[in-house]
Image (cartoon, rainbow, N blue to C red):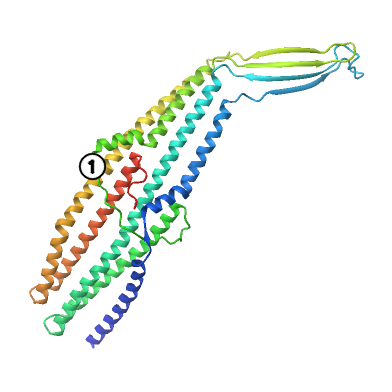
Amino acid sequence: MQGHVSYIMHRALFVLFFVFSLAFGSYASAEELKLQDLIDEALAKSPEILASQYRVGASQYRIPQAKSLPDPMVMFGYQNEGWNRYSFGEMQMSWWMFSASQMVPFPGKLALKGEMASRESESLRAVYDSSRLKVVNKVKELYYDLFLAYKNIDLLGDRTALFSRIEDAATARYSSGMGLQQEVLMAQTEKYMLLEKEEMQKQKIQSLEAMLNSTIGREVNSSLGRPSEPFPTVYARSTDEMLKMAYENSPEIRSKERMVAASEAKVRMAEKEYYPDFTITGNVMKRKGEFEDMWSLTTAINIPLFYKTKQRQAVNEAKASLSEARNELEATKLMLASTLRDNYSMLKSAERLMELYRDGLIPKTYQDFESAIAGYVAGKVEALTVISRLKALIEFETLYWAQFVEKGKAAARVEAIAGIIEPGGR
């Protein structure tokens, strides 16, 4: 009776394994997905990049506005002498009036306003470049995570076959009376636990595909395909060389530098406000009959009488904003240096760990597994030992590819900090 129950359980698990294998086959045959294609598409269609691009365009339209004179003013009216009747043409002081006036800022003010608008536009342009780098970095990181999920499914599928070897050996030993049924069930349980992990990886693939589609500007449910293996990232440059490149190319630093320049222009503009503006007005008084027309030309000048509480405080405000912008620039440089060194360290650490797993732990553990399964078949090693060796092999292989992905993601972050937008694609 116990053997019959075990047989039914074995067949049920086999059917479950067959169904999961069919599902896995659809993942294995998926269309190849290339990183560079995703990067190109993201640069062209990402909503985040497009929004930043239009923001830059809007800022450029503000430059000619800032350089333009204020709108002229036109006035017309009528002056009548007396209350009893319309006296135009009859009385000397009755006339129609027409005037036009134009406010002219003190020389240099319009140029400074244009410079401020230009610097702010340049800063937004640098922010746009930064958004491109961030989107490309995000695409690369999601691509690497998606690649790892598919790779883990491959590893689990390969190692399921090795657990089948243990199961076959346990079944043969049980059939010959040398082993226990518990060993067969133990091997089967471990094998089907891998199917559970495989299903979790498939769920992760769906989540990553949705995030990747959102990042590149596709519909969330759009089909992507299976990622091809990225090129290994090799950095011959030192940390200091990469940091120098970051200082030269980083759009975040460039944006802060433009903000400093804009703040300097604001200080000069605030100092210019000590000087008055001019309003020039031309008047024409139209009369009739024996009375000749009249005209006048006047100039009005504003007097910065309250400069202690207005213009002087505006200069102080502008200088404080300039100090803020300069300190933000230094803070950005320090942050970039720290982040770059951290990611560069992660990249090199991942390289060393990959070498350790690839050249040491994985081949050694595989030899241990082969030795253990041979010993188990001969009755010299327990089943638990063989299973533990295989689980260790799976863990080391999983860790190797996890470090491969961590290295690629760290490299993507380093490239984003250094202002490199496209290398790493395939």
426 or 107, which is in the foreground? 426
In this rendering, is residue 103 above or below 214? above
The residue at the point 52 percent across, 17 percent down is: 272
Left or right: residue 210 versus residue 338 is: right
- Residue 196 is situated, as x and y percent measured from the top left of the image, at 30, 68
The correct choice, above or below, for 181 with respect to 196 in the image is: below
Asked whether residue 317 is in view, the answer is no
Q: Is residue 218 above or below residue 306?
A: below
Rendered image quadrant of residue 81: top right
Residue 6 versus residue 46 in the image, above or below: below
Count of numbered tags: 1
Residue 97: percent from the left, percent from the top? 79, 18
Q: Residue at x 40, y 53 (%)?
A: 38
Q: Is residue 369 left or right of residue 209?
A: left
Task: Please give left or right for residue 112 compared with residue 74 in the image.
Answer: left
Amino acid at pointer 1: Ala
Q: Which residue is mark 1?
A: 236
| Residue at (24, 40) in percent of width and height | 237
Q: Tell which of 232 and 7 is nearer to you.
A: 232
Q: Quadrant of the N terminus?
A: bottom left
- Front one among 394 and 47: 47
71 or 326, which lies in front?
A: 71
Describe the element under mark 1 as helix, strand or loop. Answer: loop
| Residue 62 in view | yes
- The image quarter containing residue 204 is bottom left
Residue 293, position as x, y percentages in the image = 82, 13
Residue placed farthest to the bottom in the image?
1
Residue 164, by quadrant, is bottom left
- Mark 1, Cα crowd under 10 Å, few <14 / some 14-19 / many 20+, is few
Percent of width and height locating residue 398: 24, 60
